């Protein structure tokens, strides 16, 4: 076993840092109103459902174009898509590295934008798409085609196999009826990946089908957006009334949609875990630096064990979780993601919890100023708190670990 960061990654991360300083920081500096931690006022289109403002999204698009020109953006994609066949382990190291820098345009939490792209739907279409669906990949990478992910419903989130949206075959077409909730990104989506039951009974994994539905299809409506802990907020409520799509809208195969959904969430779960480790380390580093400066009763806070110990424990936890994330990402490079699903679950829930605890502790060490928006901790907390609920909540991840441990579901116990 070799735990060293591979040489190619060390070089990549050095070059990435140089790129961020050279091409991304100046963009940030030119738009201070978007990065002052009271950002939702500048970033949010309050009169239009609370979704991100166009100027804010355009700035991320410019960062994406620069990252693509510089050869970083597509790193994780296969070579035939202009990428470098970056592995899951590479991506975990990159995500962790980027968030250890703290928040910024290089890795923007609100829409999970990063100068090294995360492309769950591109990977899905590349793996399972028809030729017509694959034709969407390049415009997707360039941000011209945007696909939202519609799995959660008003009545079902954790228990997605119980979803009530149905699709009924009518000749060469399917007619979809139902509703989706927290369907993120619908404000600018060109397509929605809608999951609907086409056969089987509630609770069965088989019989759910994924349909790539163009946003302008009659009957697909967004009545409102949910406003969340973190703003702006692009999490749409979606209603589907007699939405007609051709048979060619199916991704992968009829009845196999759950595999598509699992592919999506597993890609995200490990990436989120890695970014959570990085941001936790950032919070710890900031708290340590502040404790060395700030004096109470004439002595630096850093000399107090009450300040040192919680940070030392978090630092230990960070090291533990980091190793779990690296190992899990490496396992995902060796095996099908479903074979290591319990490891992905372990890494994800522990890392997300750690990020929240580290942000909370950094706030505490900074005292009153830690609670203000002049420091980034409240923003970090608000964002990472979300991951304890989304992409499979903490309880659902623990349930998977327990399922494998007790032999109710398959998986690798190694
Ligand atoms: C900001 C945000 C963005 C999102 N984006 C998307 C998106 O783009 N696409 C999408 O499809 N969904 C999205 N979601 C939805 C998200 O995936 C769900 O909220 C999540 O899966 C939980 O489902 P739920 O809210 O229905 O909670 P429920 O399933 O009702 O669960 C409520 C609570 O009970 C717990 N619980 C449920 N069942 C059990 C059990 N058997 N044992 C123990 N505890 C249990 C859960 O962990 C949770 O804490 C988003 C949500 C948010 C907040």
Image (cartoon, rainbow, N blue to C red):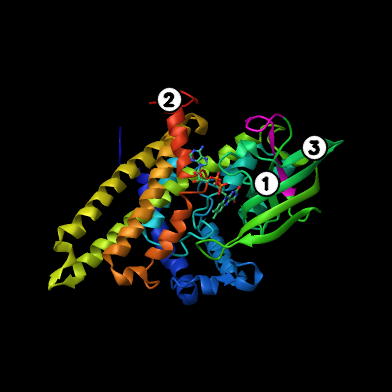
Q: Position of residue 215 (x, y in %)?
A: 73, 54
Residue at the image point whose x is 30% and y is 35% from the top: 2
| 156 versus 343 height, above or below | below
Residue 50 sits in quarter: bottom right
In the image, taking residue 335 as reference, residue 362 lies left or right, namely left
Quadrant (top left/top right/bottom left/bottom right) for the C terminus: top left
Mark seen at residue 406: 2
- In the rendered image, which quarter contains the N terminus? top left
Q: Position of residue 330 (x, y in %)?
A: 41, 36
Looking at the image, do the residues carrying marks 1 and 2 touch, with CB atoms under 8 Å apart? no
**Magenta region:** 200-213
Q: Secondary structure at mark 2?
A: loop
The residue identified by callout 1 is 193
Q: Nearer the viewer, mark 3 or mark 1?
A: 3
Q: Are marks 3 and 1 in contact (CB under 8 Å)?
A: no
Pointer 3: what residue? Answer: 168
Say which label, 3 or 1, has the lower sequence index: 3
Q: Is residue 48 visible?
A: yes
Residue 336 seen in render: no
**Distance from the alpha carbon under mark 3 to that under mark 1:** 17 Å
Look at the image and say whether residue 203 sits in the magenta stretch: yes
Check disc 1: other Cα within 10 Å, few if <14, some if 14-19, many if 20+: many
């Amino acid at each position: 076993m070799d735990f060293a960061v591979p040489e190619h990654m060390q070089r990549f991360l050095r070059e990435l840092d140089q790129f961020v300083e050279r091409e991304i920081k100046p963009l940030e500096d030119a738009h201070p109103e978007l990065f002052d931690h009271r950002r939702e006022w500048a970033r949010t289109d309050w009169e239009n459902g609370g979704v991100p403002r166009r100027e804010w999204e355009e700035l991320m698009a410019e960062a994406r174009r620069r990252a693509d020109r510089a050869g970083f953006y597509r790193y994780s994609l296969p070579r035939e898509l202009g990428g470098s066949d970056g592995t899951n382990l590479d991506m975990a190291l990159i995500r962790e590295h980027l968030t250890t820098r703290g928040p910024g345009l290089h890795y923007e939490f609100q829409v999970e934008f990063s100068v090294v792209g995360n492309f769950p739907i591109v990977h899905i279409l590349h793996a399972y798409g028809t030729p017509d669906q694959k034709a969407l990949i390049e415009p997707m990478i360039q941000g011209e085609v945007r696909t939202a992910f519609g799995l959660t419903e008003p009545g079902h989130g954790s228990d997605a196999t119980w979803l009530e949206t149905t699709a009924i075959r009518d000749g060469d077409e399917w007619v979809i009826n139902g509703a989706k909730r927290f369907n993120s990104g619908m404000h600018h989506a060109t397509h929605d990946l809608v999951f609907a039951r086409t056969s089987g009974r509630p609770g069965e994994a088989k019989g759910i089908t994924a349909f790539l539905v163009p946003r302008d299809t009659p009957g697909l409506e967004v009545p409102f957006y949910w406003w969340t802990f973190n703003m702006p907020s692009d999490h749409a409520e979606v209603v589907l009334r007699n939405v007609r799509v051709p048979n060619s809208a199916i991704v992968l195969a009829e009845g196999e949609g759950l595999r598509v959904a699992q592919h999506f969430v597993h890609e995200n779960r490990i990436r989120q875990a890695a970014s959570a480790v990085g941001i936790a380390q950032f919070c710890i580093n900031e708290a340590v630096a502040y404790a060395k400066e700030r004096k109470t009763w004439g002595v630096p806070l850093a000399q107090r064990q009450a300040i040192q110990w919680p940070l030392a424990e978090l630092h230990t936890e960070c090291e533990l979780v980091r190793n779990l994330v690296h190992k899990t990402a490496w396992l995902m490079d060796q095996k099908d993601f479903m074979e290591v699903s319990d490891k992905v679950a372990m890494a994800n829930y522990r890392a997300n919890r750690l990020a929240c605890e580290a942000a909370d502790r950094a706030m505490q060490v900074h005292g009153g100023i830690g609670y203000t928006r002049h420091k980034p901790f409240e923003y970090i907390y608000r964002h990472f708190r979300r991951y304890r609920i989304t992409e499979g909540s903490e309880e659902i991840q623990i349930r998977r670990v327990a399922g494998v441990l007790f032999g109710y579901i398959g998986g690798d116990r190694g």
